[in-house]
Every structure is written in C-alpha cells, then in structure tokens.
Amino acid sequence: MYEMPREMIRLAKPDISENLEIKIAALIRSGNLVQGKTVKALEGALADFLNAKNAIVVSSGTAALHLSLMALDIGPGDEVIVPAFTFPSTANVVEIVGAESVLVDITLDDFCIDSSKIESVITNKTRAILPVHEFGQTADLNAILDISLKYGLHVIEDAACAFGVAYQDRKLGSFGPLGCFSFHPRKSMTTAEGGLIITEEDALAEELRSLRNNGLFPKKEGGFDVHHVGLNYRMTEIQALLGLSQLESFDPYFKVREEMASLYEEKLKEISQVRSPKRIEGRETSFQTYHILLDDAVNRDALILALKEDGIETNIGAYALNELSYYKTRSDCVEGDFPNATKAYRQGLALPMGGHLNREAISYIAEKISERLTLKGGNGESKSI
Ligand SMILES: Cc1ncc(COP(=O)(O)O)c(C=O)c1O
C-alpha cells in the first residue's frame, strides 16, 4: 500500500538544469535574442548527436513539418499518406499547403501506421508518406521504405516523439530526405516551443533556412532576395540555450525510461483490463509516452478523473483524425475504416513517465489503476469503472 503523494504526479516534467537562469540572464542582457550564435551552436550539437549533415531548428514541430512539405514543393493536387492516429498537426500541415492528407489505420501493436494498408491508397497523386514514430516507437520503417522506393515517394518522418531513437544503427529522422522533431515540453528534449528538421541534402537545407526566415535568401553581392515565399519560423536564442543544456544532460534519458517501463510492465501485468505497450523485436522505443490500452468495457474518461482524485495526472495519448470534425466529414473518411485508430483514441491512456518519477510513484500509480478498475460493488462483485 503506497501513500497518496502530496503533489499531483505529473504526466511529464522536463528536467531543466538549475544553473541555466544565470546564462539566460546574461543572454537577455546581450540583446541578441533571435537566431544568432546560440541557435547555430544548437544546430551543430544536434547534427552531431543525430549524425546528420544538416540540422535546421525552427519554432515548433508543426513548423518543421510545414516547412518540409513546402521545401519538397508539395501542394494543391498532391496527396500525402498519414497515420489516422497522431497529433493533428501531422495531417493539418498537409491540408494547410493545399494538398490532401490520406489517412491509413494504425496497428495496435505499435500505434504507428499499418504498413500493410499503405499500398492500397496510393494513387498517381501521392507524393509522400509521412509516418509517425508514435510515443517514441519506431514505425515499420523497412516496409515503408520499400513501398516508397517502389512508387517513387518521399518519406518524411514525423519523429516528434522519437528524438534520439535508433533503428538499425541509424537515428530516426534520417531515413527519408527530411526528418522532423518537436521540442515541446512533453517531448524527449525541450526548448519550450521548438522543432527541428534534419537532412543530408544541402540544397534542401538551404531552402529550409530561407523558408523559416520569410523566404529571404542571401545574394552573392550582399543583401537578400526572395525566390520562394516563406514564414517566420525562427527560434529564439533563449530557446536554443535551453536546448543546448537539455542536450548536455540527455544521456540517461533512455536508461531511466527503460527502467520505468519495465517496472510498469511488471506491476500492470496482473490487471486483466490493461495492455502494456508491446515490445517489437528490432524496433527500438524510447517510451517518450507510456501508453496503455484499456479493455472496451473500461470507461477510460472516468478512469482519468478517478486517477486525478488519487493525485495522478493521465491523459489521452493522441487523436484519431477520423473522429475529428474536419477529417470526419470528408468523403474519403468512411466510418469504420480506422478501427484501430478509433480504439487507441477511445481506450488509450498515457501514464506519467519521466525522470520526475521514482519506483514508489510507479508502484502507487499501478496500485491505483488496479483499485479503480476493480472497485468492490455492494454485492462483493468487482465492477469496472
Ligand atoms: C506526432 C507529433 N507530430 C507533431 C507534433 C507537433 O509538434 P509541436 O507541438 O512542437 O508543434 C506533435 C506534438 O505533440 C506530435 O506529437
């Protein structure tokens, strides 16, 4: 029996170095606040860390995805394949550039796009596949890359949740022409808001650098020109300083999460209504989010509220796009076509995860889930929440 904690157990909490305030104060006093040498230093450090030729930081993960589509000249008349279960921005950006997002169901083993369903939606308008490494779990990349080669499609990895995860000795984000990351506080490393695109192609990197800065392009003779219109998606120096400090202390990230995931697995395995994330051989996961799946009989939203009373913050993991009004009303979004996305959206639950937890907290969370799912009714029989 574990005691209720005095403070709410947060779903996630970034680990921010204590001596950062002094550096931030000095930076603010310097007056150089936007996209200067700290941003450049962060880009260098990120390129080293991910073993990428070019790293371009931007103002958010959404901005990274948006600029990636723009740099590949994807727009009206084009189609981009996306998983039906993700954070909406994965598909929203496709719509924003005037292309059409084509939804494909996920598998409940990895919560990533079901690669066996991709080929059936490819048309002569398809330009790219945008797989998401959901919750830090590597998507079925081998199959996705094979399909992309067969049909001549770009692969743009949405690695927002999978910073630093490796697949066959290469870091995620490096398998297609462009890989995108988010540095939101819920992600593996944070710059408050922020994002990153990596690419091996210098011409794409140059284009992205221009697009994030309103399309301004340095001229040989000095000054700037605009060839393609862009946006202001620059990162501030303060954010970059935070990013550098996060990267310096990133080392234990995987080890800590692996230990916590193992403990969750051990504690949750006795609860019949709960399915822990599956481990898939050869496909690494960072457990950026620890996402369990509850039996259909469990009222997930009632469980979220009950756990809150116990001092535990939990939440839905991601969205089934086919359940959101904008996507739902489209003619190609046929009800019943995305059963796994719908199930993950309705019965999935993200549990607290990260360095702010200890073994006691995880044991307490598992104990409370078990209690809440088997509350004794008046007749002594257990009943689901
Ligand atoms: C899979 C995925 N893609 C994209 C994003 C967008 O990132 P940001 O919030 O930094 O814009 C998120 C953020 O939650 C995400 O989870």
Image (tube, rainbow, N blue to C red):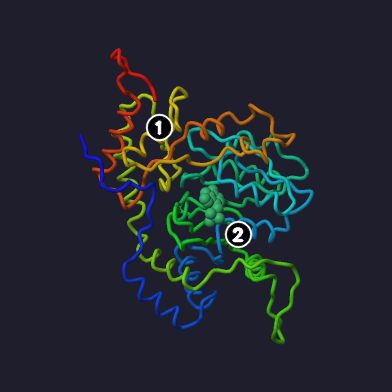
User: Residue at label 2?
Assistant: 63
Residue 289 image label: none
Q: Residue furthest bottom?
A: 221
Q: Residue at x 50, y 78 (%)?
A: 37
Pinpoint residue 301: horizontal percent, then vertical percent: 45, 33
Of the residues under marks 1 and 2, which one precedes in the sequence? 2
In front: 177, or 255?
255
Label count reads 2
Disc 1: CA contacts within 10 A as few (<14), some (14-19) or many (>=20): some
Pinpoint residue 45: horizontal percent, then vertical percent: 45, 69
As helix, strand or loop, the secondary structure at mark 1 comes to: helix
Q: Residue at x 28, y 14 (%)?
A: 380
Q: Residue at x 36, y 72 (%)?
A: 21
User: Residue at label 1?
Assistant: 303
Q: Report how far apart the C-alphas of labels 1 and 2 lie in the structure.
A: 34 Å
Quadrant where the image shows the C terminus: top left
As helix, strand or loop, the secondary structure at mark 2 comes to: helix
Left or right? Give the position of 86 relative to 355.
Answer: right
Quadrant where the image shows the N terminus: top left
Q: Quadrant of residue 249?
A: bottom left
Q: Residue at x 46, y 71 (%)?
A: 238
Circles 1 and 2: CB distance less than 8 Å? no
Compared with residue 111, is residue 12 higher up or lower down, i.e. above or below?
below
Label 2 C-beta lies within 8 Å of the nearest ligand 1 atom: yes
Label 1 C-beta lies within 8 Å of the nearest ligand 1 atom: no
Pinpoint residue 339: horizontal percent, then vertical percent: 58, 28
